[in-house]
Amino acid sequence: MNRLRLNIGPRLVLCFALIIVSMLAGDVIVLWQFHIVQAQAERLNGYDEELVTVLRVHSDMLKFRDTLESLASARDSERLKAETQSMNVAISEDMRRAKSALLAVHSDNASDPTILPTLAVVQSNLQSETASVIELAEANDWNALQVRLANQLRPLEFSISALVERIDHEVRAEHAQAAAKIRQVQQWIFIAVPATVVLTLLIAGTLGLAITRSITRPLEQLVQGSKRLAGGDFKHRVALQGEDELAQLGRVSNDTAQQLQDLYESLQNSEDRLRRVINTIPAHVWSTLPDGSVDFINQRLLESTGMPIDALLGSGWQSIVHPDDRTRYITKWRSALAAGEPVEIEARVWTAQHDYRWLLVRNVPLRDGHGEIVKWYGTGIDIEDRKRAEESLRKAQGDLAHANRVTTMGELSASLAHEINQPISGAITNASTCLRRLDHEQPDLEGARVAASRIIRDANRAAEIIDRIKMFFRKGVATKERLDVNEMIREMEILLHNEATQHSVSVQTKLSADLPLIVADRVQLQQVLMNLMINGIEAMKAVDGLRQLTLGTRNEGKEQLLVSVEDTGIGLPANQADQIFNAFFTTKQHGTGMGLRISRTIIEAHGGRLWATDNYPRGASFHFTLAVS
């Protein structure tokens, strides 16, 4: 049995060789008969070509005669000469082809030997007749020309017609002979093909049955081993003995199973290492399907939230996002899924310590070779400490802004005292007037009422000024409200009116009437305006001539409005205009260098920007934008 297994390859070769030999024998017979048919077909093609070329010559002769008769009737010698020469050339070419076809067919002289001489005589006579026709046409002897056409060309035409009939008779005879030979070939093929098929089937059946018995059982073992291998059973081995091809295939299968087992163990080890790395890195890691459903979460995220993995897979992760951040987070995440672009989101996430901590979440897509998204991978980094640091920084900035306001108010103490003294002095004067009118023998009650009203007015004015001062001294978190920028500018104009008057500064306003309300912190924006107005007033102390401070507002597109503070002072510092917003940079003798820096920080926190430009011929302009929304 082992000996037979060694000869599986040669026995298969012998089987196929016998089948091929039997098929080749039948094919040789069929091809031999086909060769006979092909030779007969080629001979018929030659006769058909011979007939076609002679028919073309006959057609040319008829056309030549008809054309000459028509031109002779028209008596157009020039055209007759041209047409005669042209058609003579065409007839000569067709006769040359006819001779070639006739020589190819009649090279064995087995057919009519008068065909070629007849064609040569016709060609010679045609050339001589053509020359005669041209001479008669040039001599304008049209009657003689027509007689010659009738007497000379028609016999040539009759000769060609007779030639066509003889060739047609030959072709018919050849066709009949070819049909007889083809019938004989068909009989041979009807016998040879079935005999070849029967012999081939007998050989194939006998050898196939014998070889199948020696191959089927080993193949069954190999198939069973392949199924076990496909099912992940890498320890199964195929038990085949011998040195034939199937036994070698069994050994290859066993070696492959061993290699797959080693590879699977190595892959498991690599996967375990990768899982340990993912679970150990100081970040939350997850992956999602293309539709955004979470399908993997690392151990660190599970430990951080204290929740089971089943509660976070799919869309369950939404439950750990802070309610105030959830809508914003989900909206951005869905927009990223639709656009297929990476996204970065900050949100608060529930922890196992029963509180929320800030995470910086990043999600990026993984694409295949066609650009289609197959996975999303995300990371979450704890930024709670950074958020607290930012909050501390904002508090420090608020404290610095408050100190700047206190310093500014201290510098304006004399001006503010004068501003408060005015309504107080007015109230005292009106109180004295009220008392005098009441001390009359007939008390002047109407006059006393008017004086008392003026006392109330002056007291309210003083109270308003004190409230504004208290607001500037207020320290706390930013409180945003809806406010009218024009109204805020008018308040600052009143507050700094005395300061401007002391330095002979004229304050003008150019306020747009159609400004929308904005949401902002009133105190912070008032601080920005105070810093810019005081800077403008101080810049005009050292200049002679016009001292004018202009406050303006206007719409800047649909989403922003523009506020400007312009002065006619000394202008921006030469070669240092780009440094005036840097911290601790100042051109004042006792300045801190923080006013403009704080002002820019406040404006940027409100979604705008602050910048400065030179005025012509002197002075400077400070502009800042505020977001309407």
Image (spheres, rainbow, N blue to C red):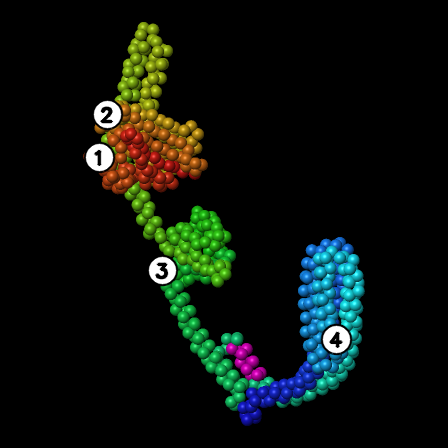
Upstream in sequence: badge 4 or badge 1: 4
The residue at 39%/53% (across/down) is 360
Which amino acid type is shown beneath numbered disc 3? Pro
Tell me the element at label 4. helix
Label 1 to label 3: alpha-carbon separation: 50 Å
Label 4 to label 2: alpha-carbon separation: 131 Å
Which stretch is magenta? 219-229
Q: Mark 2 points at which residue?
A: 544
* Residue 61 part of the magenta-drawn span: no
The residue at 59%/87% (across/down) is 12
Upstream in sequence: badge 3 or badge 4: 4
Q: Name the residue under label 1.
A: 588
Tell me the element at label 1. loop
Residue 262 in the image: state x and y as whole percent: 43, 77
Residue 87 in the image: state x and y as whole percent: 70, 62
Q: Is residue 115 visible?
A: yes
Q: Is residue 14 above or below residue 369?
A: below
Nearer to us of marks 1 and 3 is 1
Characterize the local packing of mark 2: few (<14), some (14-19) or many (20 or more) Cα atoms within 10 angstroms. few
Label 2 to label 3: alpha-carbon separation: 66 Å
Characterize the local packing of mark 3: few (<14), some (14-19) or many (20 or more) Cα atoms within 10 angstroms. few
Which amino acid type is shown beneath numbered disc 4? Ile
Label 1 to label 2: alpha-carbon separation: 19 Å
Examine the residues drawn in magenta and state their main secondary structure.
helix
Residue 188 in the image: state x and y as whole percent: 74, 84
Q: Name the residue under label 4.
A: 115
Q: In the rendered view, does 476 fall on the left or right side of 306?
A: left
Placement of the C terminus among the 4 image quadrants: top left
Of the numbered discs in the image, which one, if any, rests on residue 233?
none
